């Protein structure tokens, strides 16, 4: 009999959770729709006034003022220019973190829109244009909208929501720390301790109205690398007097291509080994003493990442040694992002929320991508789910839609309300399921 009562109590509790959650989500959806013009206006303002990583002072001030006006506790200056808002619900429960990145890129905008960026600044010693060429302006605007929705229903929330507005996702300036790694180091996931984190990224090649996701490794780890080959200089007419670092480098480059084709289990994951630049010598008839190569490594699991690093070092040093030269390998040089790994249990748990928000037919299981995201630093510490929101106009060919990080990058703003709803509903369902 006791077992029967327990079962009935569980059924009643589940029914009560479902009803409460549905009521709260309906309220959140209605409020999100009413905020559409406001969210778009925020995005356009931020787009017109972009700022590079660790310099997002205007954006941070806009965010902080908005959160404070909502009665949210605000901390500024986190990881240089980051803003963290804390919203305590009216009832006890877990802590959910929501993240948006704030920084723009050193790109000159070419899109013909009224709010196009005309901003110029100095980056690594060069004058550059500044553009939100990856959609971080939309991330900020949507999370500001989410904050307004949830603040308006805080007395009904079972738990706490931490809003993380992060600088320098694209990487900090040379010689500086920044981004998610620094935010984690400064304790953004503590006090109160975060139980789960959600984030989204707008995508210019996914149609508006759709959400894409992937459990496990969804975005690659990223390591930049530098291989320095040292040989012996000689006159170009007498190559037998040299140990030619250019020839050695050519052999190394060819051998590196065998890592993916011969060392990686391609039935499980993909990976990338790319040499993006090679510098050596300054005259046609002089064999130089040294060649420097820069490149990037991308992997979709921690084990594959370790393998890539090990094999690059082994191939470069041993190939050089076999040819009488030496090679030193730096991995990473300045940048390392871990694999963006969506916790499989959390992803499965929240999938029905995404499907009920966007419609089951509009929630797509996507392939893993070899781009990288520093959201991965949060997911190393707590279970996380990072999703992709459609930003491409309906009917457009994805192959012809301008990609991220380009001067022609374009986002259809009609998809923002779905992003606000998704983050609100993920938060509500997670908090309700834990009460």
Image (tube, rainbow, N blue to C red):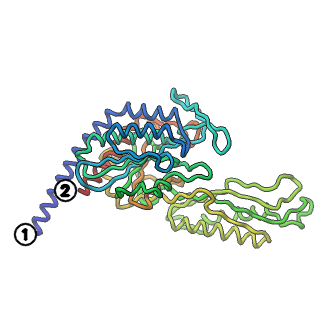
Residue at the extreme right of the image, as rendered: 237
Look at 62% across and 66% down and name the residue there.
259
For image coordinates 48% across by 35% down, the residue present is 46
Image point (78%, 56%), residue name = 280
Left or right: 197, with 23 as reference point: right
Local packing at callout 1 (Cα closer than 10 Å; few below 14, some 14-19, many 20+) is few
Q: Mark 2 vs mark 1: which is more N-terminal?
A: 1
Q: Which of the labelled discs sits on residue 1, or is there none?
A: 1
Instruction: Say whether residue 366 is left or right of residue 159.
Output: right
Up-down relation of residue 198 to residue 411 (above or below): below
How far is disc 2 from disc 1 in space, using C-alphas? 20 Å
Residue at horizontal 24 percent and vertical 54 percent from the top: 92
Q: Which residue is labeled 2 in the image?
A: 14
**Can residue 314 be seen by looking at this rendering?**
yes
Report the residue that reaches farthest toward the left: 1
Q: Is residue 212 visible?
A: no
Q: Is residue 259 left or right of residue 195?
A: right
């Amino acid at each position: 009999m006791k077992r029967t009562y327990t079962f009935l109590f569980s059924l009643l509790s589940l029914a009560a959770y479902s009803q409460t959650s549905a009521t709260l989500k309906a309220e959140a959806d209605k409020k999100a729709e009413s905020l559409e013009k406001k969210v778009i206006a925020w995005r356009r303002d931020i787009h017109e006034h972009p700022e590079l990583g660790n310099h997002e002072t205007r954006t941070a001030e806009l965010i902080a003022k908005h959160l404070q006006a909502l009665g949210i506790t605000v901390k500024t200056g986190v990881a240089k220019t980051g803003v963290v808002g804390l919203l305590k619900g009216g009832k006890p429960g877990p802590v959910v973190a929501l993240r948006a990145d704030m920084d723009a890129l050193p790109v000159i905008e070419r899109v013909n829109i009224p709010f196009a960026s005309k901003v110029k600044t100095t980056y690594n010693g060069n004058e550059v244009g500044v553009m939100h060429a990856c959609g971080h302006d939309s991330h900020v605007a949507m999370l500001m909208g989410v904050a307004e929705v949830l603040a308006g229903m805080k007395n009904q929330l079972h738990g706490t929501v931490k809003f993380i507005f992060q600088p320098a996702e694209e990487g900090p300036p040379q010689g500086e720390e920044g981004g998610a790694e620094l935010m984690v180091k400064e304790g953004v996931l503590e006090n109160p301790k975060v139980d789960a984190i959600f984030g989204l990224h707008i995508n210019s090649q996914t149609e508006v109205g759709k959400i894409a996701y992937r459990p496990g490794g969804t975005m690659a780890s990223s390591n930049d690398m530098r291989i320095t080959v040292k040989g012996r200089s000689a006159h170009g007419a007498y190559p037998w007097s040299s140990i030619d670092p250019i020839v050695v480098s050519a052999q190394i480059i060819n051998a590196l291509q065998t890592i993916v084709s011969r060392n990686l289990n391609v039935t499980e994951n993909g990976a990338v080994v790319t040499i993006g630049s090679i510098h050596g010598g300054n005259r046609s008839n002089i064999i130089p003493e040294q060649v420097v190569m820069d490149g990037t490594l991308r992997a979709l699991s921690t084990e594959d990442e370790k393998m890539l690093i090990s094999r690059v070092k082994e191939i470069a040093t041993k190939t050089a040694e076999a040819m009488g030269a030496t090679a030193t390998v730096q991995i990473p040089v300045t940048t390392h992002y871990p694999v963006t790994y969506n916790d499989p249990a959390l992803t499965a748990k929240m999938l029905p929320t995404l499907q009920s928000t966007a419609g089951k037919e509009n929630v797509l299981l996507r392939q893993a991508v070899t781009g990288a995201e520093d959201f991965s630093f949060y997911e190393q510490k707590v279970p996380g789910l990072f999703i992709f929101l459609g930003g491409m106009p309906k009917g457009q060919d994805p192959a012809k839609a301008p990609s991220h990080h380009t001067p022609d990058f374009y986002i259809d703003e009609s998809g923002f309300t779905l992003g606000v709803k998704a983050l609100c509903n993920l938060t509500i369902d997670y908090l309700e399921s834990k009460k």
